[in-house]
Image (cartoon, rainbow, N blue to C red):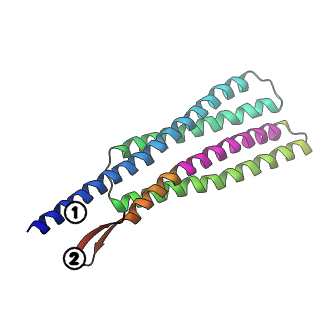
Amino acid sequence: MKQLFTLLLILLYVQVHAQDSLKNFNYSRNHITLTGMKVLGSWGIVNLGVGAAGWAGNDGGSDKYFHQMNTLWGAANAGIAVLGLTGAKRNLSKQPGVAENIQAQQSIEKTFLINGGLDFVYIGSGIFLNARGNSHNNAQLKGYGSSVIMQGVFLLLFDATMYSAQRTNGNKFRGFLEKSTVIFSGNKIGIVYNL
């Protein structure tokens, strides 16, 4: 009886520890996302303000189109940040289980990795537009190209930083899962915690 009671206490401790750890990993993932979306939103707002002022105060030339494109990117980045903030805040209070945590962690890492790849496309497109504008003496293409290059470089740094932070959190989570194994074979259940 004493052994059964001890086993039950150990199982209860491991389950409480596992739930607390899952809650911490979920919180960390969403806190990283919240911080990132605040940075992206700030970048978007700055681009909206400076871009609109530069666009309105310019009579022509590539600077006008540079500011015009930055205004559009600013609006897009601010919109994405609002959606990201809303989702991350909503997820902070959730207590997902192991499977949901694994799926959410893989999804957020994949999102920033794919976005990083797209950032190279933006930079390449901006270089192309800029070169095309130079060869055809087209101020609009030069301005747009310079803006897309700048936005692509910022987003590449942003996505690389976010991926790195989320990957670090994910590696801690995966390490925790490797140490805490739940075994279920249909009629037996057990928890193994490797030290």
Residue 42 lies left or right of residue 2; in this view the side is right
Specify few, some or many for label 2: CA neighbours under 10 Å numbering under 14, 14-19, or 20 or more.
few
Q: Which amino acid, mark 1?
A: Leu
Q: Residue at x 64, y 38 (%)?
A: 73
Residue 157 covered by magenta stretch: yes
User: Can you tell which of label 2 and label 1 is closer to the viewer?
Assistant: 1
- Give the structural element (helix, strand or loop) at label 1: helix
Relative height, residue 11 to residue 132 (above, below): below
Question: Which residue was labeled with disc 1?
Answer: 11
Relative height, residue 104 to residue 74 (above, below): below
Q: Which amino acid, mark 2?
A: Lys
Specify few, some or many for label 1: CA neighbours under 10 Å numbering under 14, 14-19, or 20 or more.
some
Residue 28 percent location from the top left of the image: 43, 46
Q: Residue at x 59, y 35 (%)?
A: 75
- The magenta span reads 140-165
Question: Which residue was labeled with disc 2?
Answer: 188
Closest to the observer: 61 or 155? Answer: 155
Residue 142 percent location from the top left of the image: 82, 39
Q: Residue at x 57, y 32 (%)?
A: 42
Relative height, residue 74 to residue 177 (above, below): above
- Give the structural element (helix, strand or loop) at label 2: loop
Residue 87 covered by magenta stretch: no
Q: Residue at x 24, y 78 (%)?
A: 186
Residue 32 percent location from the top left of the image: 48, 44
Residue 134 lies left or right of residue 92; in this view the side is right
Closest to the observer: 57 or 50? Answer: 50
